[in-house]
């Protein structure tokens, strides 16, 4: 398994409701199976809005074989955002240790699309968030194994909507994702200023993203990040990402992937270690039961590299004393140890037994 993962690294680089909540009106007695075996959809009649919606639910790997409870990622524009989110998780878990989530999308199915009404803070936005808070969230909590860790994603009109939710319902979601807001982000700072006129902190994990061709939105997003950081909120974690060479449509998938990576993927933070200290790790290494493959740790300048046989060396980035990672596959955790006067390193992948490589004399 070690060689497989190591090769992969080289290649890939090689139903209970509260009294003040409106009772849910589920029109179907059982969910309709979606084309994806891990997703179902419900026809749902909202008492808050007085219309029907389609609620999509995608199950994380292992949901049907464990008793694990999961965080929930709620998606606006569920009719098309669901498949994008599913694929983002599928791709990211190849390279990162990922916290799995139940994905819930709110859409319209075959009905007329009302996103320009429902997601616009100036029209139906306030009623739509009431629908989510009073009906959708309790429905999901009553039907599925979830924890009270919730995120909300929106793009375009959805980005305008999630901006509103961040400041007008600051305690409803743990994480808010604002993608390419349809008003070019012109209301980001004004909405924040209204909030901070009466509040001094904001406990949320916030991600904003957009394509670089939307230059005004990119500018407003970056200025908003600076403004928010200057508020010195103890409970705020904010990040932005500009997708290069992409407009409003082309950036959607990458913005969502960046948001999911920010929220659900373990990412290391590289630190600096002097070359003299890194030199202790250099040398030849081998797996005891595998004399065929040759491994070497090299030092070039102040950078440490790992080479397997004749393959292109991969840089090891330090994140703690004796601990390293690879940007190409952050699922792998590399640690150096000493046993007596001998050094060895451990390659560890999630849910797998670590592989030991001993340093040759």
Image: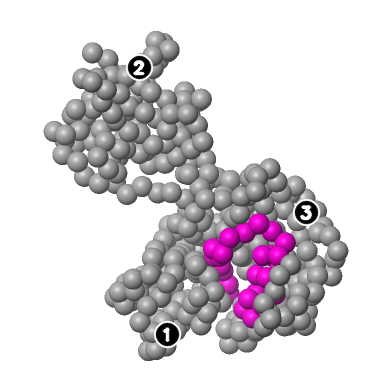
- What segment is highlighted magenta in the picture? 129-158
Which mark, by number, is residue 34? 3
Which residue is pictured at 51% across the width and 36% down the height? 351
The residue labelled by disc 1 is: 195
Front disc: 2 or 3:
2
Q: Earlier in the sequence, mark 2 or mark 3?
A: 3
Question: Percent from the top left, x then y, of residue 284?
Answer: 28, 18
Residue 324 position in % (x across, y down): 32, 38
Disc 1 crowd rating (10 Å Cα; few below 14, some 14-19, many 20+) is: some
Which quarter of the figure is the C terminus placed in? top left
C-alpha distance separating marks 2 and 3:
48 Å
Q: How is the image coloured?
A: one colour
Q: Quadrant of residue 28?
A: bottom right
Numbered label attached to residue 214: none
Task: Please give the name of the residue rendered at 29% of the width and 30% of the height, measured from the top-left corner.
Answer: 336
Question: Circle 2 is placed at which residue position?
Answer: 286
Helix, strand or loop for disc 1: helix
From the viewer's perspective, is residue 278 above or below residue 181?
Answer: above
Mark with earlier residue (1, 2)? 1
Tell me if 186 is positioned left or right of 299 in this view. right
Dot in front, 3 or 1: 1
For residue 115, which quarter of the picture? Answer: bottom right
Label 2 crowd bin: few (<14), some (14–19), many (20+), radius 10 Å: many
Q: Position of residue 346 (x, y in %)?
A: 36, 28
């Amino acid at each position: 398994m070690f060689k497989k993962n190591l090769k992969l690294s080289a290649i890939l680089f090689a139903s209970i409701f509260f009294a003040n909540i409106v009772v849910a009106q589920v029109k179907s007695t059982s969910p309709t199976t979606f084309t994806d075996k891990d997703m179902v959809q419900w026809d749902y009649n909202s008492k808050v809005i007085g219309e029907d919606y389609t609620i999509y639910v995608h199950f994380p790997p292992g949901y049907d074989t464990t008793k694990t409870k999961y965080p929930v990622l709620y998606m606006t524009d569920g009719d098309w955002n669901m498949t994008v989110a599913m694929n983002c998780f599928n791709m990211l878990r190849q390279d990162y240790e990922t916290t799995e989530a139940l994905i819930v999308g709110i859409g319209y199915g075959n009905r007329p699309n009302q996103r320009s009404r429902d997601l616009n803070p100036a029209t139906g936005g306030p009623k739509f968030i009431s629908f989510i808070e009073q009906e959708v969230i309790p429905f999901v909590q009553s039907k599925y194994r979830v924890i009270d860790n919730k995120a909300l994603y929106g793009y375009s009109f959805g980005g305008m909507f999630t901006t509103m939710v961040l400041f007008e319902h600051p305690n409803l979601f743990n994480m808010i994702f604002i993608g390419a807001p349809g008003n070019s982000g012109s209301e980001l700072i004004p909405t924040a200023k209204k909030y901070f006129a009466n509040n001094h902190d904001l406990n949320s994990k916030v991600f904003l993203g957009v394509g670089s061709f939307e230059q005004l939105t990119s500018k407003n997003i970056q200025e908003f990040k600076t403004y928010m950081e200057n508020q010195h909120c103890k409970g705020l974690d904010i990040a932005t990402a500009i997708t290069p060479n992409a407009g409003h449509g082309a950036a959607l998938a990458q913005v969502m992937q960046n948001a999911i990576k920010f929220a659900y993927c373990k990412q290391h933070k590289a630190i600096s270690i002097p070359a003299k200290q890194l030199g202790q790790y250099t040398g030849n290494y081998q797996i005891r039961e595998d004399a065929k493959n040759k491994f070497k740790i090299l030092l070039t300048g102040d950078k440490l590299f790992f080479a397997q046989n004749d393959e292109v060396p991969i840089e090891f980035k330090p994140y703690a004393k004796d601990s390293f990672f690879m940007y190409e596959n952050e699922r792998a955790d590399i640690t150096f140890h000493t046993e007596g006067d001998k050094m060895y390193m451990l390659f560890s992948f999630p849910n797998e037994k670590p592989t030991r490589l001993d340093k040759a004399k």
